Image (cartoon, grey):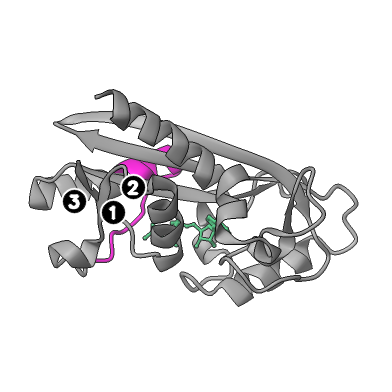
Amino acid sequence: KELVFATNNAHKIEEVADAAGNQFKILRLKDIHCNDEIEETGTTFRENASIKTHYIFNKYGLDCFGDDSGLEIEALYGEPGVFSARYAGEHGNHAANIARVLDQMEGVTNRKAQFKTVISLLWKGQEYWFEGIVHGTIHTEVSGNLGFGYDPIFQPEGYPVTFAEMSLQEKNNISHRGKAMAKLIDFLKKL
Ligand code: ITT
């Protein structure tokens, strides 16, 4: 099975390729010669995941899946949420996004947060969704330099380290994306 993964995020590609193993072949946007930035105008992860897959299907007619994800912090009423990639303004400026979160969380005792991923799959004209959540807490400073995005300030429940201090495989075993991917793969295997 061949599937296009509708993302421009190289870290997501790495994690997803690892989660998929050799069970199906993932094509990157550059493999189908697509350099487009897909505009995310939705207000939920589900809507944005759907926007990504519909864009690719409408333009190329290919089966594909897309991942929309983000960090939801309880004390910030679910922010940054769908704005995770552009919380400090500029899309994908992870250092600035982390700085803004740490700033907002200064002096806040409730450090609870969750990462969430919603995957949209467009398969033979039908859409399916798969979700994954991991609970954890927000650190008061960065630790670790692996992973991407908010990984250096997110400590998953039950572990003594942040996602940025875990190998890709360790993170995939417990992460929001790892869980959503496991559901997607399970579904694809049954087709
Ligand atoms: P695509 O839309 O092209 O897939 P993106 O980076 O814009 O890539 P999102 O719109 O889903 O992806 O934004 C997700 C943001 O949430 C991402 O840029 C990170 O800041 C954060 N994020 C998502 N998953 C994460 C993870 O596993 N670890 C750390 N931060 C994550």
How far apart are labels 2 and 1 at the CA level? Answer: 5 Å
Local packing at callout 3 (Cα closer than 10 Å; few below 14, some 14-19, many 20+) is many
The reply to whether the C-beta atoms of the residues labelled 2 and 1 are less than 8 Å apart is yes
Local packing at callout 2 (Cα closer than 10 Å; few below 14, some 14-19, many 20+) is many
Q: Which residue is mark 3?
A: 56
Tell me the element at label 3. Answer: helix
Q: Closer to the N terminus: mark 2 or mark 3?
A: 3
Residue 181 visible, this orientation: yes
Amino acid under label 2? Gly
In depth, the one of 131 and 19 nearer the eye is: 19
Q: Which residue is mark 1?
A: 6
Amino acid under label 1? Ala
Residue 80 visible, this orientation: no
Q: Closer to the N terminus: mark 2 or mark 1?
A: 1
Tell me the element at label 1. Answer: loop
The reply to whether the C-beta atoms of the residues labelled 1 and 3 are less than 8 Å apart is yes
Highlighted range, magenta: 36-50
Q: Which residue is mark 2?
A: 66
